[in-house]
Amino acid sequence: MRIWVDGRIVEDREATVSVLSPTLNYGFGVFEGIRAYWNGKNLYVFRLAEHMERLLRSARIIGMDIPYTAEELVKATVETIRANGYREDLYIRPVAFIAKPQIGLDVRGVQASVAIAALPFGKYLKAEGVRAAVVSWRRVHTSMMPVMAKATGIYLNSIMAVLEAKSRGYDEAILLNAEGKVVEGSGENIFVVRRGILMTPPVEDGILEGITRETVITLAGELGIHVLEKSISREELYTADEAFFVGTAAEVTPIVEIDGRPLPRGPITERLARKYREVVLGQDEKYLGWLTPVY
Ligand code: PMP
């Protein structure tokens, strides 16, 4: 696999970091997760510019200086995919990190590197629906960690949540914030339908500002489905008519059980999942601006 590292396309084994990298040791890094879809004729990267802009915002939040513009990173992504000649669905992982050794925690002025890797990728969660558990680990609070940044260190919180959900026999975790409000999955935002109203937790409850979340809010508006950004309690979650996860990897995935309580795959979830699929495959002209063609 060929990857892009600081302006050069190299074989992945040549892209190395020190074992004393502060990104590896302390979680000082930021990353993105992006998908590209092959529609039989061309490969389209979904909302590539928005992902690169979020990467730069995440870096700004944690105080990391990335020496590239979003436009340069967009071009680099296309170059990476072409260098591999991919003609299939992909997951793209840009990561900004410190490659050099450093023991101390003062990372002011240290040089950040960026790598972009792309690899063939299928479904992340079961398309037919997942069984989810509200886990005991809480989502890190925004007063403790910059949750709005997609920062590497924060993902230990997500890994602990996944391990707990899996150890209890579930497919995915749902996390509450420190106040007990439902916030997100381990790597997805969450939507809940109650009495015909679609709702999702607000950014201020401490979630990642998901690009799929924003996409789904836009598509719901077009379909005439009212969306409310409001705090969601555990009881509202348990009495939902429908619930689903959204994310680049997860796309729109129905939640079919929460803590032993079965949920049907409902009509609002189905309509949004179908619409999302059409949009990412370039079948809706209105949203072609969200797609970057690779070839
Ligand atoms: N929340 C978390 C914690 C995530 O890791 C992700 C995946 N990036 C999301 C939500 C969904 O974000 P997006 O739709 O931008 O992929």
Image (cartoon, rainbow, N blue to C red):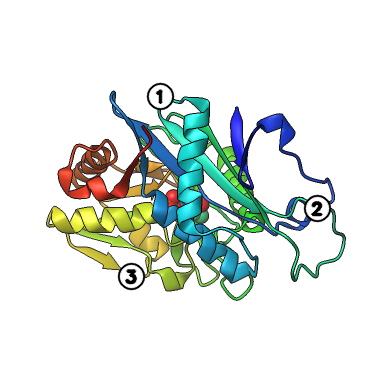
Amino acid type of the residue tagged 1 in the rendering: Arg
Q: Are marks 2 and 1 in contact (CB under 8 Å)?
A: no
Cβ of mark 1 under 8 Å from ligand 1: the answer is: no
Query: Dot 1, how many residues are within 10 Å of its Cα: few (below 14), some (14-19), or many (20+)?
Result: some
Cβ of mark 2 under 8 Å from ligand 1: the answer is: no
Amino acid type of the residue tagged 2 in the rendering: Lys
Q: Residue at x 61, y 61 (%)?
A: 66
| Element carrying mark 3 | loop
Q: CA distance from mark 1 to mark 3?
A: 40 Å
Label drawn at residue 100? 2
Q: Residue at x 16, y 44 (%)?
A: 285
The N terminus, quarter of image: top right
Which residue position is annotated with label 1? 87
Apparent side of residue 234 relative to residue 22 in the rendered image (left or right):
left
Apparent side of residue 147 relative to residue 47 in the rendered image (left or right):
right
Q: Picture quarter containing residue 152?
A: bottom right
Cβ of mark 3 under 8 Å from ligand 1: the answer is: no
Q: Residue at x 27, y 38 (%)?
A: 277
Pinpoint residue 15: horizontal percent, then vertical percent: 71, 38
Q: CA distance from mark 2 to mark 3?
A: 43 Å
Q: Nearer the viewer, mark 1 or mark 3?
A: 1
The numbered mark, 2 or 3, whose residue comes first in the sequence reads 2
Amino acid type of the residue tagged 3 in the rendering: Lys
Label drawn at residue 230? 3
- Can you say whether 90 is above or below 115 in the image? above
Apparent side of residue 160 relative to residue 132 in the rendered image (left or right):
right
The mark tally for this picture is 3
Pinpoint residue 206: horizontal percent, then vertical percent: 49, 68
The numbered mark, 2 or 1, whose residue comes first in the sequence reads 1
Pinpoint residue 146: horizontal percent, then vertical percent: 58, 69
| Element carrying mark 2 | loop
| Element carrying mark 1 | loop
